[in-house]
Image (tube, grey):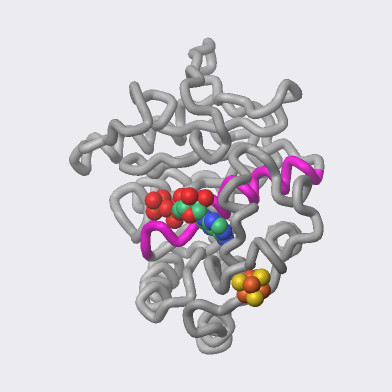
Amino acid sequence: MLENVKHVILVLSGKGGVGKSTVSTQLALTLKEKGFKVGLLDIDLCGPSVPYLLQLEGKDVHQCPQGWVPVYTDAGQKLGVMSIGFLLDDRNSSVVWRGPKKTAMVKQFLTDVYWGDLDYLIIDTPPGTSDEHITVMENLKQVKCDGAVIVTSPQEVAIEDVRKEITFCKKTGIPIIGIVENMSGFVCPNCTECINIFSSGGGSALSNLLQIPLLGTLPIDPNVGALLGKACVVDFPESTAAKVFHQIVDAISKEV
Ligand SMILES: Nc1ncnc2c1ncn2[C@@H]1O[C@H](COP(=O)(O)OP(=O)(O)OP(=O)(O)O)[C@@H](O)[C@H]1O
Ligand code: SF4
């Protein structure tokens, strides 16, 4: 049920493994830290990593008369999470459903979860533009989707995939809030120097070329990889990553 959800934000990526779920979870945690009431819906049915990244594995989803109750990260119920991962027996089992069953599951996630009043619902989508994305867009027609954040890595191939995401957003009428370039450089744990591993500047070149804002450039940071349930903006407030998440939230607040 999305009636009482003020803003819906999609997180997209052209390729797997570029850090889309990390961006989704840290974005949700940053919004929560700023005092908003937030929902995080993980519709990556084949690789649901949100329960792991938030250390909520093994938690059960309950039913109430209004629908499924999300799993909350905190006693104050400021961040609620729904993922197929809560419905699977263990983290290593994966869903091998065909299109119609996946579509039905995503639809159920959009209609049957009792989120209550939310300021923001962040939807972590699978990589690419699949059946799940189309179902989301069809079911969001009644609700306004405020925009998409596109996550990419600096390699040329990932950047090419971003163009496909942009085409999908244009065709489905979703405003693009901006691009986040992840895994751009490596923060040395010894001296915190950032070393570029791939060619740098891909995100900003793409942003200039396609006239889409670059929301931030996140380096590979061992502290970010080890966050697991913790908010980067709280635990590492001085890090580049924390600054980038504040920037993303500022861009979202301006857009919606
Ligand atoms: N900036 C970063 N610094 C360090 N580790 C990172 C960073 N971004 C992501 N990771 C790590 O990389 C791994 C993959 O990230 P994540 O699960 O967010 O990617 P994804 O794009 O959602 O992948 P999938 O396509 O499988 O859903 C995770 O272990 C995560 O902790
Ligand atoms: S960045 Fe600095 S501390 Fe890290 S490996 Fe290089 S020289 Fe050593």
Say whether residue 62 is left or right of residue 107. Answer: right
Q: Is residue 63 above or below residue 143?
A: above
Q: What residue is drawn where x is 80% and y is 60%? A: 238
Q: Is residue 206 above or below residue 247?
A: below
Instruction: Return the residue nearer the eye: 226 or 181.
Output: 226
Magenta highlight on residue 55: no
Image location of residue 207, percent across then percent down: 56, 81
The quarter of the displayed image where residue 184 is located: bottom right
The quarter of the displayed image where residue 255 is located: bottom right
Instruction: Return the residue nearer the eye: 61 or 48.
Output: 48
Say whether residue 42 is left or right of residue 76. Answer: left
Of the four image quadrants, the one with ligand 2 is bottom right
Image location of residue 100, percent across then percent down: 22, 39
Res 140 visible = yes
Res 179 visible = no
Q: What residue is drawn where x is 46% and y is 36%? A: 110
Q: Which residues are magenta?
A: 15-34
Looking at the rendering, in which quadrant would you find the C terminus? bottom right
Instruction: Return the residue nearer the eye: 101 or 125.
Output: 125
Counting every numbered tag in the picture gives 0
Q: What residue is drawn where x is 34% and y is 59%? A: 129
Q: What residue is drawn where x is 41% and y is 47%? A: 136
Image location of residue 68, percent across then percent down: 49, 20
Image location of residue 36, percent across then percent down: 76, 41
